[in-house]
Amino acid sequence: MSIHVIGVVALVLVFVVGTLRPINIGALALIATFFIGTLVANETVDELLAGFPPDLFVLLVGVTYLFGLAAVNGTLEWLVDRAISLLGDRPALVPWLIFVFSAVPTLAGALGPAGVAMLAPLCLRLGERYGVDRRMAALMVMHGSCLGNFSPLNGLAIIVRQVAEANGLQVSAAELFFGNAAYNVGLAVVIYLVFGGRALIREGRDRVASAGDLQARTRPAVEDPVVAGVGADETADGETAAGGARTTTRAPHVAPVKTPLRLDQIITLVVILGVAIGALVFDLEIGFLALVAAALLHLLFPSRFEQADRRIVWSVVLLICGVVTFVGALQRYGTIDVVGNGIAGLGNPLLTAFLLCLVGAITSAFASSAGLLGVLIPLAVPFLVQGEVGVTAMVIALAVSATVVDSTPFSSVGALTLANAPEADRGPLFRTMLAWGMAMVVTAPAITWLVFILPSS
């Protein structure tokens, strides 16, 4: 049995066992890396760990440490309160605000992980305060970030154009950007409808109606802070207590009371802003920036941040780093190249185009999207020069297929989003992100083939 077959079978077993049993998938992936590397590939321990992602390790530790501190001393809550004061009673708009807000850094040129690292904690907390399904908030963060991936200012777009030009291909920058943006907007609409958007719209209408009822009353005061029609066994949130029947909806939104910032919170905000500017404007390594900033805050205000280092999500770090190490080993053994070259030699341009998009989606779900595009575009050159498939259409399909799968929990973007979820919600959110990401693996190649490649052939 070849090492490529062994590797693929082991990868499938890791996910099956890790899903059916309460064992960290990252630990299983590291074990698989060890056994295949030593028993099949005859590698030393140093060689089999060559795929361990130190940059991702530092990124996850530094960012979750910094925003763990900001959560412990109340800085994040202060920011969310300010956002609520501006938004008012419009819960249906919150997911779209999260989506647009998350797109801004990548549109301006930042890579996805840098933007999500700064925005995911705030966006997820804002969604929680408005009762937005955490799954919707997380997916909106990730696909909002994906929307700007191929902005003319973004590094991914530059990489794709340079690889294409180096292989004698011309790609339309505008078509690449708008094609990817339109695809992610379409996904955002699906996410909004599937994960509770219609309920948020109804809730907003009910709140407006409830507010009108309150204003129409002639009584000067109400003993309970509840809406008319709520019985003694129902809370102001419209939740039924002691078995009583639910008779009305949540009371209108009340703006949070503004509280002054303490010195430690002011410095926390300044430090977070400094990290954001360093990463997004000067392209400094955000993981180390966040780690230095977190250590500085902890040193200055130890009493405000007791046990805050426990907010570092070691389970997610193990999960992501273990899987990426195993997939890196498969790439090192040439498994991806073997599959890609076999597909490129099929001789049927349309079938080849679809299968390359599929390989891109599957592999990118666990590895670097930018690095993978640098490999797949050259593989597509032999049949693209025949003129049977449009060059820009093929590149758009590859780009979308390789990046929308960043919503899996194994990408940098997905890992950062998962790490910023509360511990109690992390398991269900992981399963949702895994299922959604696998759906992207299956649907993105098929849809992009139908929408972009087939019309260009």
Image (cartoon, rainbow, N blue to C red):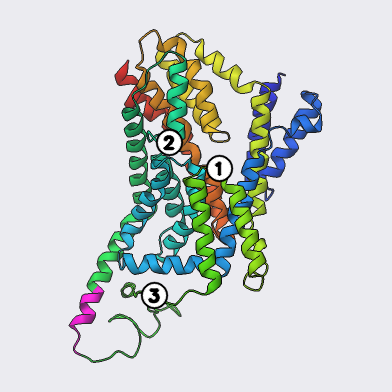
Task: Indicate the amino acid at tag 2.
Answer: Asn
Task: Indicate the amino acid at tag 3.
Answer: Pro
Check if mark 1's residue and mark 2's residue have beta carbons within 8 Å: no
Task: Indicate the amino acid at tag 1.
Answer: Ser
State which quarter of the image contains the C terminus. top left
Query: What numbered label is drawn on residue 256?
Result: 3
Query: What numbered label is drawn on residue 412?
Result: 1
Q: Position of residue 225 (x, y in %)?
A: 35, 84
The kind of secondary structure element at disc 2 is loop
Query: What numbered label is drawn on residue 154?
Result: 2
Asked if residue 2 lies left or right of residue 421, the reply is: right
Question: Between marks 3 and 2, how big is the CA–CA gap?
Answer: 37 Å
Q: In terms of depth relative to the viewer, which is nearer, 56 or 226?
A: 56
Q: Residue at x 25, y 65 (%)?
A: 205
The kind of secondary structure element at disc 1 is helix
Q: In terms of depth relative to the viewer, which is nearer, 16 or 412?
A: 412
Q: Position of residue 447 (x, y in %)?
A: 37, 30
> Dot 2, how many residues are within 10 Å of its Cα: few (below 14), some (14-19), or many (20+)?
many
Question: Between marks 1 and 2, how big is the CA–CA gap?
Answer: 17 Å
> Dot 3, how many residues are within 10 Å of its Cα: few (below 14), some (14-19), or many (20+)?
some
Q: In terms of depth relative to the viewer, which is nearer, 121 or 229?
A: 121
In the image, the segment drawn in magenta is: 210-218
Q: Position of residue 197 (x, y in %)?
A: 34, 55
Q: Position of residue 373 (x, y in %)?
A: 50, 26
The kind of secondary structure element at disc 3 is loop
